[in-house]
Amino acid sequence: MLRNSKQNIALTGFMAVGKSAVGRTLARRLKRRFVDLDREIEKTAGLKVRQIFNQQGELVFRKLEKEALARVLAGENQVIATGGGVIMDEENLQLLRKRSLLVCLAASTEQLLKRAGNGAKRPLLQGGNRKERVEELLRQRQEKYALAHATVDTTDLTIDQVASKIIDWLNREE
């Protein structure tokens, strides 16, 4: 699976699953650059993700996300935390699978809701029943998440434990 030791590692999975926290820890432990795709989008747009959604809509956000992903994946030796919906675009998914080892982080619906807090900073959780919304989005994304090279259930694990599981998987794949 590992084409070279500098190949990117990209983390995908639902919002609040721990992609950024695990990504930072994993990058530190592997001595790699950490890239949070949402922060890259914010730097380019000059707005927070929440503001982009509210002021310009999801379509504009997804366009910015696609552009940022292509820029980031041109590099190597990175740990990349993607947004939870980036894989819904087939071109994004194929680029992630080609230019990185794609690891999906998963967790129970209850754990995701707990980690997301009140959801105020999560544009896709605004309005309506949050549990139903999470379950609906998970159903929509399940097929795409399953195409990752590996999946780690983070429900009952610490950030360090998740990073260790990924490192163990990487060592087995070499």
Image (cartoon, rainbow, N blue to C red):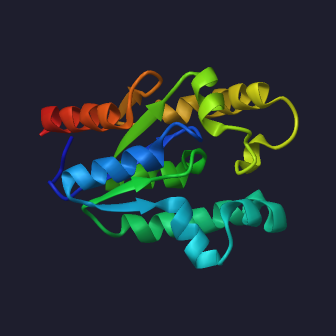
Q: Quadrant of residue 79?
A: bottom left
**Quadrant where the C terminus lies?**
top left
In the current view of this chain or complex, which residue is farthest to the right?
A: 128
**Residue at the spot x=50%, y=34% of the render?**
145
Whether residue 156 can be seen here: yes
**Residue at the spot x=41%, y=62% of the render?**
35
159 displayed left or right of 87: left
Q: Quadrant of residue 133?
A: top right
Q: Position of residue 53 (x, y in %)?
A: 76, 60
Question: How many dots with numbers?
Answer: 0
8 displayed left or right of 16: left
Seen in the picture, residue 169 relative to 102 is either above or below; the reply is above
Q: Quadrant of residue 14?
A: top right
168 displayed left or right of 138: left
Foreground residue among 158 and 54? 158
Q: Position of residue 85 (x, y in %)?
A: 61, 46
Q: Position of residue 56 (x, y in %)?
A: 80, 68
Whether residue 8 can be seen here: no
17 displayed left or right of 64: left
**Residue at the spot x=36%, y=53% of the render?**
24
Seen in the picture, residue 154 relative to 56 is either above or below; the reply is above
Seen in the picture, residue 112 relative to 47 is either above or below; the reply is above
**Residue at the spot x=22%, y=38% of the render?**
167
Seen in the picture, residue 111 relative to 29 is either above or below; the reply is above
Q: Position of residue 18 (x, y in %)?
A: 48, 40
